[in-house]
């Protein structure tokens, strides 16, 4: 194959124009530049194709089958999705995960924005102190959810945990944080806020950094108060960052698994069951693979829809 | 008026920093708790009120961890897996990113859109077929299963491409005129230029691999193949409640990332921030 020059227009035309010596240059030397990009892409797409793209497609197909274990499969159309819609455990997982996501969007993200605004403002004048705060609030990102869950399992312990001890000194009676349906999900939300508030505030800091100081100065010269400047100037200019942070929060939140799996195993009575955890239960403890694949696709749909909204809004704002 | 304004600013400063410092305490408390508990015997961990400084530095938890569990083996496994994923991920991303950034070829846009479009897909979508594939290939409890599927990182291709777009074409053309082969250009020109993005990707891939939990959970059932993330929770079960040893292991398991962070703080933060784009 390689020794035979391909008979396309370009290679057929060149020999006449070029001196005879060109004939001795190999096919590879003449086509290296055209072939090289494909060779550079090959290793990536080989692995990506086998271990990602193929499973993406095969999972989609699987979601239309009744497949228990690795054995027989029966085509059942959209039955898995129909069952999902009326599955009370799935609905519970969807509700829990949505509540967690709402907390990410409406508690975690604003908190991170406030943190960023404080660290950037006159409240922290010294650059050293600014970077001290940034580093400390970033620290949870150095550990895994596994370590975080193990630490907080102790902190939330009803009998000797740090949290109940601290509350006892305020006269508040002991609470079984992870064992009571009322408190289990809020406890997990607290841990997530602790984990991500610093990282999210770094995105806001980066966004704030991109707003030129002159704009704020101009606003204050025009007689705007700090409050007006914040709502009328800072927030509108920060819109892309806010959107980015919220979209990330939604996509990641819907994939919540590690924390509840390790802290509560989804309990008590499914109070902290998440979609990803239900997928795990269905796929890897009940081996209902087709059903689990359908759950996986329900997660994908959420991620795709949210991404499309983000994409659409960015386009819209770009045209403004 | 001016004095009034200055003093109100001062008040805000004091109040603001008080809140921020309170937050700092909340941030570091769990870590101090972890380190403190790792140096205490079990009985002392459960005493009320909690003492941050142990009465004596107790090393029993560490001895138990190193001698009676497979922690050292887990640690080695985590290092192998994290390095494997990092090296593979960085090389494949740089090669593909270079092709997308600096070559014109048929299918470029389609392939790049394919990469970008799949960025947001959660790993949960592929979990089931990927697991079936591993079973069929006999890869349960293997390094191959832990490393290979995560060797191709779309986010890496994206980052490498964005970075390499900035490399001037003249540089590459000059090298071609000098007769340099395409592979040589990649090795001698692109790799050295790409050092910053390589570092960002390496940190991102390494720490993501180190923290990975769900995939080891699915693919491993042999204690000898466990990673730190999978091993530590296995120490707390119905029969064992070695919280001290678990905290010791958590501390040891955080050290590698902490060290990388201390060596290159700015790059580390960049790497973690870049990771979020993957969604």
Image (cartoon, coloured by chain):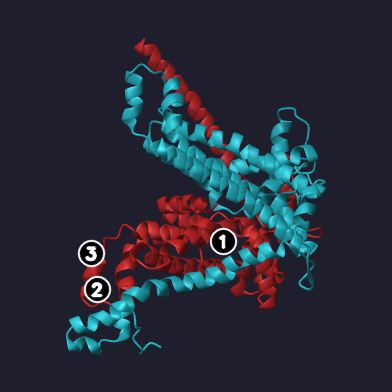
Chain colours: A cyan, B red
| Near-viewer residue (B67 or B124) | B124
Query: Any mark on residue B170, and which?
Result: 3
Determine whether the residue tagged by mark 2 lies in a helix, strand or loop. Answer: helix
Query: Any mark on residue B176, and which?
Result: 2
User: Closer to the camera: disc 1 or disc 2?
Assistant: 2
Q: Mark 1 or mark 3, which has the lower sequence index?
A: 3
Label 1: which residue?
B210
Q: Residues within 10 Å of mark 2 (few under 14, many from 20)?
A: some
Q: Quadrant of residue B51?
A: top right
**Disc 2: which chain?**
B
**Mark 1 and mark 3: Cα distance apart in space:** 40 Å
* Mark 1–mark 2 CB contact (< 8 Å): no
Q: Mark 2 or mark 3, which has the lower sequence index?
A: 3
Picture residue at 26% right of the left edge, 60% below the top: B168
Determine whether the residue tagged by mark 1 lies in a helix, strand or loop. Answer: helix
**Mark 1 and mark 2: Cα distance apart in space:** 40 Å
């Amino acid at each position: 194959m390689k020794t035979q020059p391909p008979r396309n227009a370009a290679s057929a035309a060149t020999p006449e124009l070029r001196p005879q010596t060109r004939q001795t240059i190999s096919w590879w030397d003449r086509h290296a530049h055209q072939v090289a990009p494909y060779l550079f892409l090959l290793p990536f797409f080989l692995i990506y194709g086998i271990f990602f793209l193929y499973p993406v497609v095969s999972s989609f197909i699987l979601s239309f089958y009744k497949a228990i274990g690795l054995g027989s499969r029966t085509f059942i159309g959209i039955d898995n999705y129909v069952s999902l819609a009326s599955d009370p455990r799935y609905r519970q997982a969807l509700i829990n995960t949505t509540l967690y996501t709402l907390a990410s969007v409406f508690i975690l993200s604003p908190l991170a924005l406030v943190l960023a605004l404080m660290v950037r403002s006159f409240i922290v004048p010294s650059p050293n102190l600014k970077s001290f705060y940034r580093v400390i609030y970033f620290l949870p990102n150095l550990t895994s959810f596994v370590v975080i869950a193990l630490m907080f399992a102790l902190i939330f312990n009803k009998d000797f945990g740090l949290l109940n001890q601290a509350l006892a000194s305020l006269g508040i009676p002991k609470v079984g944080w992870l064992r009571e349906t009322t408190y289990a999900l809020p406890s997990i939300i607290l841990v997530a806020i602790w984990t991500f508030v610093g990282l999210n505030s770094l995105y806001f800091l980066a966004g704030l950094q991109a707003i030129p100081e002159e704009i704020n100065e101009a606003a204050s010269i025009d007689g705007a108060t700090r409050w007006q400047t914040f709502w009328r100037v800072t927030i509108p200019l920060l819109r892309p960052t806010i959107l980015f942070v919220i979209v990330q929060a939604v996509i990641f939140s819907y994939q919540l698994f590690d924390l509840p799996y390790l802290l509560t195993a989804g309990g008590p009575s499914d109070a902290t069951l998440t979609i990803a955890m239900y997928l795990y239960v269905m796929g890897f403890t009940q081996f209902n693979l087709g059903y689990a694949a359908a759950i996986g696709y329900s997660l994908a749909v959420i991620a795709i829809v949210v991404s499309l909204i983000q994409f659409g809004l960015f386009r819209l704002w770009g045209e403004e | 008026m001016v004095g009034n304004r200055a003093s109100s600013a001062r008040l805000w400063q004091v109040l603001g920093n008080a809140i921020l410092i309170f937050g700092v305490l909340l941030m570091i408390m769990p870590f101090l708790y972890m380190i403190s508990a790792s140096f205490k015997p079990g009985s002392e961990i459960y005493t009320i009120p909690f003492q941050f400084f142990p009465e004596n530095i107790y090393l029993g938890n560490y001895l138990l961890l190193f001698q009676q569990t497979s922690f050292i083996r887990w640690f080695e496994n985590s290092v192998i897996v994290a390095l494997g994923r990092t090296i593979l991920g960085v090389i494949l991303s740089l090669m593909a990113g270079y092709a997308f950034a600096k070559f014109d070829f048929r299918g470029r846009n389609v392939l790049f859109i394919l990469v970008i479009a799949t960025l947001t897909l959660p790993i949960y979508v592929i979990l089931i077929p990927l697991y079936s594939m591993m079973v069929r290939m006999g890869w349960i409890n293997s390094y191959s299963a832990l490393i290979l599927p995560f060797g191709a990182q779309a986010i890496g291709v994206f980052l490498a491409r964005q970075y390499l777009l900035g490399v001037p074409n003249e540089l590459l053309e000059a090298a071609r005129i000098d007769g340099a082969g395409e592979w040589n250009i990649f090795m001698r020109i692109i790799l050295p230029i790409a050092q910053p993005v390589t570092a960002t990707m390496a940190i991102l891939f390494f720490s993501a691999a180190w923290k990975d939990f769900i995939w080891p959970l699915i693919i491993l059932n042999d204690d000898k193949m466990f990673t730190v993330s999978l091993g530590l929770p296995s120490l707390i079960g119905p029969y064992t409640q070695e919280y001290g040893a678990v905290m010791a292991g958590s501390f040891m398991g955080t050290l590698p990332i902490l060290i990388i962070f201390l060596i290159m703080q700015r790059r580390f933060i960049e790497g973690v921030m870049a990771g979020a784009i993957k969604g």
